[in-house]
Image: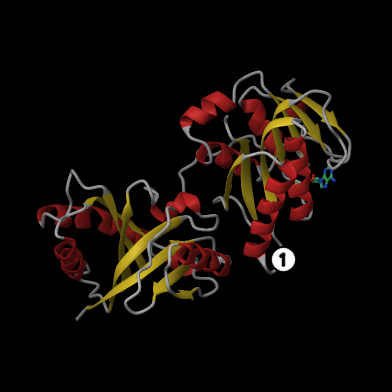
Amino acid sequence: MAIIEPTHAVLALCRAGFEGECGQELADLAGRTGGVGYVRARNGTAMAEFVASEDGKASAPAVESTIFARQVVSVFARLTALDVGDRISPMLAAVRARADEAGRVPWREVLIESPDSDGGRELAPLCRRLAGPLDQALLRAGLLSRTGTRRLHVVFTATDAAMLGEHTSDASRPAAGGIPRLRRLSGAPSRSAAKLDEALAVMMDADERQRLLQPGMRAVDLGAAPGGWTWVLTRHHVQVSAIDNGPLAAHVMDTGLVTHVRADGFRWRPAKTVDWLVCDMVEQPIRVATLIGGWLADGACRQALFNLKLPMKKRYAETLACLERLRDTAGLPLDLRCRQLYHDREEVTVLAIPARR
Ligand SMILES: C[S@@+](CC[C@H](N)C(=O)[O-])C[C@H]1O[C@@H](n2cnc3c(N)ncnc32)[C@H](O)[C@@H]1O
């Protein structure tokens, strides 16, 4: 017999190994809106929870406002001891109870997902198999509505356990696990290329991409070798000064769009303002933040996109300190976006665009 336990928690899915940072961030964000509760974040599970204390509320932040969460869900029920022959009936019961409580059916669609952990990835085929039948069952039961503004989330944590949650459709991500579907990059000279490709695809909207990334623009790539980020920029027909003492792949140079400069990225500056500064140097994050802030302060670049490498223990605190340093050094209002992308490992990606006046 399945057990349905009503609950008030915010669940975030994240990169395995970053549960602590993700939990800290959830608690931090909850604290700003008066949320009281505690964090559950077990290493290797690829998820973190902020559980509201008794009588307490935990309002889920928009996933785009977080750094370490790939997906954010407001959990209303935990299901355990699910009968593997019929997982759907108890789900319908829990969803109906929630609709009764809300006095309406607020959901337009349902998404089934699992954490990006070793165990969670094994649940992906089950999630895919249940997607159609659950969708149909919810429709038949009148528990999905065309006028709904929310997304229903089912997060499997074991073959017989799942959390049921929800979020407004624009505050969670439509792809399972919040993992974007990106094209394969054939011909990229390094794995790192996927990070910049993803950043350009997900950290700006279509309008910004069209406005800010145009053929003929000029960019500087600090720490460019072997040339993955530079190569991604050349595919957008951007001219690149690639700064690194290491060699660049021959086919990157063959694009005719690249000037290789063997120099120290902390010292080299362009003669004229460039459209983009990108930087993937493996250096202390606070030094990188200070460097980029200096470029923005001096008007040496119009916008910047860079990685902060986070090998140290206090990675959440370090990230916040770097963002503060960036703002202080730049000394101008910035539209700052910081996110641990799917392709980021021990690092986060930052996009800094001076605010439009
Ligand atoms: C992770 S790799 C960059 C990979 C590159 N983004 C790509 O996609 O192929 C880091 C690079 O930063 C360079 N680097 C580290 N410190 C540097 C510095 N002070 N000046 C210039 N390059 C530096 C290293 O030589 C190395 O090639």
Task: Compare residues 47 and 7 and report the one nearer the observer.
Answer: 7
| Number of residue marks | 1
Q: Is residue 298 above or below residue 281?
A: above
Counting from the top left corner in percent of width and height, residue 83 is at 22, 75
Is 78 left, or right, of 252 in this rendering? left
Residue with the mark numbered 1? 312
Q: Secondary structure at mark 1?
A: loop
Q: Is mark 1 within 8 Å of ligand 1?
A: no
Counting from the top left corner in percent of width and height, residue 52 is at 38, 73
Q: Which quadrant of the view contains residue 79?
A: bottom left
Residue drawn where x is 35% and y is 74% of the image: 56
Residue drawn where x is 67% and y is 68% of the image: 314
Is 39 left, or right, of 167 in this rendering? right
Q: Is residue 128 above or below residue 232?
A: below
Is 71 left, or right, of 281 in this rendering? left
Instruction: Note whether residue 149 is visible.
Output: yes
Badge 1 crowding class, 10 Å Cα cut-off, few under 14, some 14 to 19, many 20 or more, is few
Identify the image quadrant of the N terminus: bottom left
Q: Which quadrant contains ligand 1?
A: top right
Identify the image quadrant of the C terminus: top right
Task: Compare residues 247 and 141 and report the one nearer the observer.
Answer: 141
Q: Which quadrant of the view contains residue 296?
A: top right
Task: Compare residues 300 and 216 and report the one nearer the observer.
Answer: 300
According to the image, what is the colour scheme of the structure? secondary structure
Residue drawn where x is 79% and y is 51% of the image: 287
Instruction: Note whether residue 115 is visible.
Output: no
Counting from the top left corner in percent of width and height, residue 72 is at 41, 58
Look at label 1 and name its amino acid.
Answer: Met
Counting from the top left corner in percent of width and height, residue 181 is at 45, 43
Residue drawn where x is 68% and y is 43% of the image: 306
